[in-house]
Image (cartoon, rainbow, N blue to C red):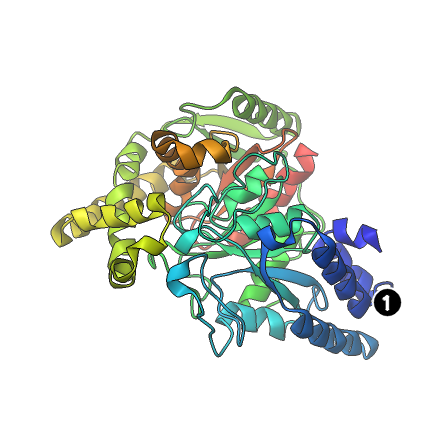
């Protein structure tokens, strides 16, 4: 049964469908592993034992009657603590929302539940989702699977840890600037950032509504694809037989994405490109100078909207916040309305240039993150180190958010080094198919 904790969600689902795995026994296995784990309280904010067992019992009954609702019917997964769950505290990693208990599930949780998934509980996260590092001195900082003294990646830090430490078959997080892909990269997982607007944000605690997205952190591309479907209430794409990479064209983005890479990250990226070439893919260097203009707009676009949404709540009790997160929010008060509108107009122009530059490529490739997980103790004691690390951590993933894309982070042979694939807006299925092929080539 301990092997169940390492299996992909898809394989668990196939085992349930074949009658080889009992959903009740599977859920009990996960719950027992969670309760026995010494880092449980740094990963889960709450474990929903009763709900999980009730859902597992219903899944077992459907399996016996051959009425399973999806390939993942009966599979246990975790949910980041910004997805509303009926009767269960949802505080988005912040004491500003302490005691907040919603009366109904977020739409995506309701969809996934209706398709048969089992909710194990809620996972820790960066405060109000406004950090790429995963450090949260206010609540708990989840562990990084590769380095106990390092940051786990945020803001879906607990979601990543729950999967990486074998305490969930899949984790559901959110990505506003990289918060699914960064913790996935730093914890050797697959992370899917969906296109803004594709998946419902109803019942999701917001940060920046124009950039907020929902996505899975998983053990395989197939798992990510199946969870994409379940979040929308469908079965998801079939990725079991990925196509050959022969003749596929990838852009190797040089602008911004290759700056200031740590040596291990640079080496991992070069190795990935070599494996893709060996599999028959064409790799084309790409420069998009206008991308730097878009990156320069990040401060005004993100902080202005975030502070606009949270100003009244924050300023009523600013002492409840981690100082670094508070400062980042308050930076949004420095920009005027006309400046914000002008920044969005400029970003739309940059997006048009990007679309033209990447036409004809199957995906654009970058390292998921230019740096390895930074030291947690230094992050808490050195302001300049924190600011630099946070900006660098989010830089490459933010390209996907600013350009309005879907994106995928895949693990590489180097721990905490991910390969990012940037796709076209609303083309998740195509990106997942090519991602499954890349995943096979990297193995």
How far from the left and from the top, in percent, is residue 417?
A: 57, 32
Q: How many marks?
A: 1
Q: Quadrant of residue 413?
A: top right
Q: Which secondary structure lies at badge 1? A: loop
Q: Is residue 356 above or below residue 98?
A: above
How far from the left and from the top, in percent, is residue 176?
A: 40, 51
Instruction: Looking at this view, name the residue that lies furthest to the front.
Output: 319
How far from the left and from the top, in percent, is residue 93?
A: 46, 56
Of residues 109 and 431, the one drawn nearer to the viewer in this rendering:
109
Is 429 situated left or right of 18 in this image?
left
Is 18 situated left or right of 111 in this image?
right
Q: Is residue 291 visible?
A: yes
Q: Residue at x 37, y 31 (%)?
A: 388
Of residues 279 and 334, the one drawn nearer to the viewer in this rendering:
334
Q: Is residue 218 above or below residue 442?
A: below
The residue singled out by tag 1 in the image is 19
Of residues 379 and 189, the one drawn nearer to the viewer in this rendering:
379
Q: Residue at x 52, y 27 (%)?
A: 283
Q: Residue at x 20, y 46 (%)?
A: 343
Q: Is residue 369 visible?
A: no
Instruction: Looking at this view, name the residue that lies furthest to the right.
Output: 20
Q: Is residue 26 above or below residue 264?
A: below
How far from the left and from the top, in percent, is residue 54?
A: 71, 77
Is 98 situated left or right of 347 in this image?
right
State which quarter of the image contains the N terminus.
bottom right
State which quarter of the image contains the C terminus.
top right
Is 388 situated left or right of 190 in this image?
left
Q: Is residue 105 above or below residue 344?
A: below
Of residues 193 and 131, the one drawn nearer to the viewer in this rendering:
131
Q: Residues within 10 Å of mark 1 (few under 14, many from 20)?
A: some
């Amino acid at each position: 049964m301990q092997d169940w904790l390492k299996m992909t969600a898809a394989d668990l689902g196939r085992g349930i469908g074949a009658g080889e795995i009992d959903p009740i026994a599977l859920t009990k296995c996960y719950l027992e592993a969670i309760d026995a784990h010494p880092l449980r309280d740094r990963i889960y904010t709450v474990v929903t034992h009763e709900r999980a067992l009730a859902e597992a019992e219903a899944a077992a009954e459907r399996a016996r009657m051959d009425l399973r609702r999806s390939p993942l019917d009966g599979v246990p997964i975790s949910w980041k603590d910004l997805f509303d769950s009926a009767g269960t505290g949802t505080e988005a990693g912040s004491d500003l929302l302490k005691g907040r208990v919603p009366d109904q599930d977020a739409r995506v949780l309701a969809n996934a539940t209706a398709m048969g998934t089992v909710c194990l509980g809620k996972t820790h996260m960066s405060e109000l989702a406004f950090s790429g590092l995963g450090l949260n001195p206010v609540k708990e900082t989840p562990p990084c699977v590769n380095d106990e003294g390092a940051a786990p990646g945020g803001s879906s830090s607990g979601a990543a840890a729950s999967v990486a430490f074998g305490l969930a078959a899949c984790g559901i997080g959110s990505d506003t600037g990289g918060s699914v892909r960064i913790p996935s990269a730093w914890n050797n997982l697959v992370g899917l950032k969906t296109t803004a607007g594709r998946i419902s944000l109803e019942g999701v605690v917001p940060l920046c509504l124009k950039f907020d997205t929902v996505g899975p952190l998983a053990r395989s591309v197939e798992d990510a694809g199946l969870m994409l479907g379940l979040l929308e209430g469908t079965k998801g794409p079939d990725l079991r037989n990925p196509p050959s990479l022969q003749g596929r064209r990838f852009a190797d983005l040089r602008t911004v994405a290759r700056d200031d890479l740590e040596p291990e990250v640079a080496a991992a990226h070069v190795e990935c490109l070599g494996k893709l070439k060996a599999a028959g893919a064409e790799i084309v260097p790409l420069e998009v100078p206008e991308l730097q203009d878009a990156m320069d707009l990040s401060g005004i676009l993100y902080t202005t909207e975030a502070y606009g949404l949270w100003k009244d709540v924050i300023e009523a009790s600013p002492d409840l916040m981690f100082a670094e997160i508070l400062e980042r929010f308050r930076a949004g008060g420095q920009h005027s309305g006309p400046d914000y509108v002008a920044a969005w107009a400029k970003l739309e122009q940059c997006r048009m240039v990007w679309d033209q530059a990447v036409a004809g490529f199957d995906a654009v490739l970058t390292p998921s993150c230019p740096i390895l997980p930074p030291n947690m103790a230094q992050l808490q004691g050195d302001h300049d180190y924190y600011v630099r690390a946070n900006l660098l951590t989010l830089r490459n993933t933010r390209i996907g958010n600013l350009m309005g894309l879907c994106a995928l982070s895949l693990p590489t042979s180097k721990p905490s080094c991910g390969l990012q694939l940037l796709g076209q807006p609303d083309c998740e299925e195509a990106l997942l198919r090519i991602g499954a092929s890349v995943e096979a080539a990297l193995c």
